[in-house]
Image (tube, rainbow, N blue to C red):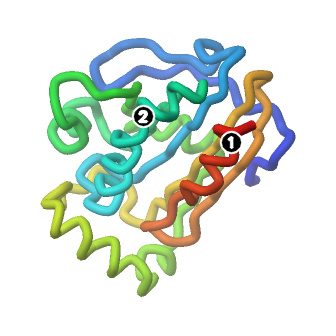
Amino acid sequence: MRLTVGQRAPSFSATTWDGKPVTLADFEGQKLWLAFFRYASCPLCNVRVRAIYRRVEELRAAGVAVVAVFQSPGEKVREYVLEGDEPPMPIIADPEMVLYEQYALERSVLGFLAPRNIGSFFESRKLDVGGLSPDGPLDRIPGDFLIGPDGTLVDVFYGSAISDHIPFEQVDAFMAR
């Protein structure tokens, strides 16, 4: 069942791509943007990750921490998602998809086939990001969760297509709160 605004964010304990522990409790008292992606080589996801990378400092200055989650093992995250040795935010490798289950992320064949994915795919080709080495369900739909300092969900975004992510306008409103 989908999570809703006002609920407590499900507690988690996970590992980043390079084996470091990360928990929801690590962000207690801060705003947190928890961004779920598909597999690490997903070209559409890599376009979005790079857009977030460009805004990480602005988000930090506004008191918002960002954590990304991929349904891939750490070595795939390193190969496809990192732009250098150390990403500007924690990236969780969740190949068992435990967090995906906790946060009720969905799958959809129609979302995989949605015509609106085409524009994002062409954008990814221009940027030469990602690849086609899937590990995990191809029809996984991304989702985003904006979590308040008290651990409650302030905004919840479940995409309906594989190219969907929370609009930056909603993130901007969260930053301004």
Badge 1 marks a residue whose secondary structure is helix
Which residue, as the protein is rendered here, is positioned at the far right? 6
Amino acid type, mark 2: Val
Where 136 sits versus 53, above or below?
A: below
Q: Which residue is mark 2?
A: 56
Whole-percent x and y of residue 104? 65, 49
Answer left or right for 128 relative to 167.
left
Kind of residue at disc 1: Phe
Label ID, residue 46: none
Image quadrant holding the C terminus, namely top right
Residue 42 against residue 4 in the figure, above or below: below
Number of marks drawn: 2
Report crowding for label 2: few under 14, some 14 to 19, many 20 or more residues within 10 A (C-alpha): some
**Mark seen at residue 174:** 1
Closer to us: 65 or 75 = 65
Cα gap from disc 1 to disc 2, whole angstroms: 14 Å
The one nearer the camera, 141 or 146, is 146
Residue shown at 42% from the left, 34% from the top? 56
Residue 43, image quadrant: bottom left
* Within-10-Å neighbours for mark 1: few <14, some 14–19, many 20+: many
Looking at the image, is mark 1 or mark 2 earlier in the sequence? 2
Which residue does the image show at 35% across and 47% down from the upper left? 49
